[in-house]
Amino acid sequence: MSERRTGLPSGPSRRRLVVNADDFGLSPGVNAGIALASREGLLTSTTLMANAPFFDEAADLLRDLPGLGVGIHLNLVRGVPLSPAGSIPLLIGTDGRLRPFRLKMRLDREFLYQAELEWRRQFERIIAAGVRITHADFEKHHSWQAPLYRLACRLAGEYGVPAVRNLREPLIWALRRMGWPGWRRFAMAAGLRMGLMLLGARAHPLACPDHFLGQSHIGGMTEEIWLRFIRHLPPGISEVMVHPGMPDDPTDPRLAAMGAGRLGGERQDELSAILSVRVRQAVEEAGVKLISFREIAWRLV
């Protein structure tokens, strides 16, 4: 990825950390958890899902969260699309919802055309809500496939979005420094990493953190993991992906729009870690500066 803008303008020993919460707009509990983590915890950034059922609630919350960087959580694999069903037949199932994540999507010209239609609507809905989008990332990382990744970067540039997530988590580093995450999490992270390695380098002009962390421990970023993680944070700019949240009302019919979620009580555990006094103290003692994608994109680090 030789053309991407990473790194810091000064010494390599400096460590900067973006704490980014995915899934803003997914549910009232997720929205409340992200808002609390921003106000009282370490959270510096989030990504808003434009087709989520609680998007409007999330957009309203942002008015009281001026310090929170907000990106776009591009989504082709979950929920009801923003595009008319007749315009994106390859993306949806018989129930009218986006098809679930598939390891191998049909990525011919027509599929990419329909993906572009849906993603444009997602960009435009977030922009219409008054959000200045700091960066792009992806629901369930489905855009590790090169044609979709290139499309996302092209659209980001067109809509004035300056940065994108670096999907290449250093798995060996994560295992040595953060501990064994369990077979399920490791297999998911290893599959993503293998797919990225097979694709090879993909240059793009967008800003990007030097390191991406948390994929191998998704749903498992507990206080203990955070304390290990901070002790060994590598030099440069890192993004750690988190999924904080509070309990939801299981009888709320709107929750069904996105299908069953894999993370449940784990969101509360991750929220507790982001709010932890011990973790904040560890960050301060390690001299790690918390930033958002705004600082990366606009070279304020």
Image (cartoon, rainbow, N blue to C red):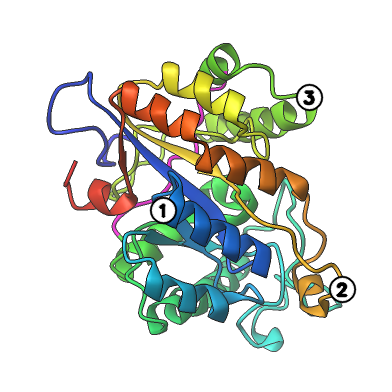
Q: Which mark is residue 251?
A: 2
Q: From the viewer's perspective, is 99 left or right of 58?
A: right
In the image, what residue type sits under mark 1?
A: Ser
Any magenta on residue 272? no
The image shows residue 9, relative to residue 40, as above or below, that is: above
In the image, residue 72 above or below residue 255:
above
Q: Dot 2 surroundings within 10 Å: few (below 14), some, or many (20 or more)?
A: few
- Report the Cα–Cα distance between label 1 and label 2: 30 Å
Amino acid type at image mark 2 = Thr
What is the quadrant of the N terminus in the image? top left
- Which residue ends up furthest to the top in the rendered image? 176
Q: CA distance from mark 2 to mark 3?
A: 32 Å
Q: Secondary structure beneath disc 3?
A: helix
The residue indicated by pointer 3 is: 183
Residue 108 in view of the camera: no
Examine the residues drawn in magenta and state their main secondary structure.
loop
Query: Where does label 1 land, which residue?
Result: 45
Mark 1 vs mark 2: give the one in front: 2
Task: Identify the residue at image location x=63%, y=16%.
Answer: 179
Return the disc, 1 or 2, that comes first in the chain's sequence.
1
Tell me the distance, in whole angstroms, between the alpha carbons under discs 3 and 1.
28 Å
Name the side, left or right, on which 35 lies relative to 239.
right
In terms of sequence position, does the residue under pointer 2 or pointer 3 come before the other?
A: 3
> Quick check: can you spot residue 253?
yes
Tell me, yes or no, whether the two marked residues, 2 and 3, touch with CB atoms within 8 Å: no
Circle number at residue 296 = none
201 to 119, vertically: above or below? above
Q: Quadrant of the C terminus?
A: top left
The part of the chain drawn in magenta is: 162-171
Residue at 73% across, 54% down: 101
Q: Position of residue 89 (x, y in %)?
A: 72, 78
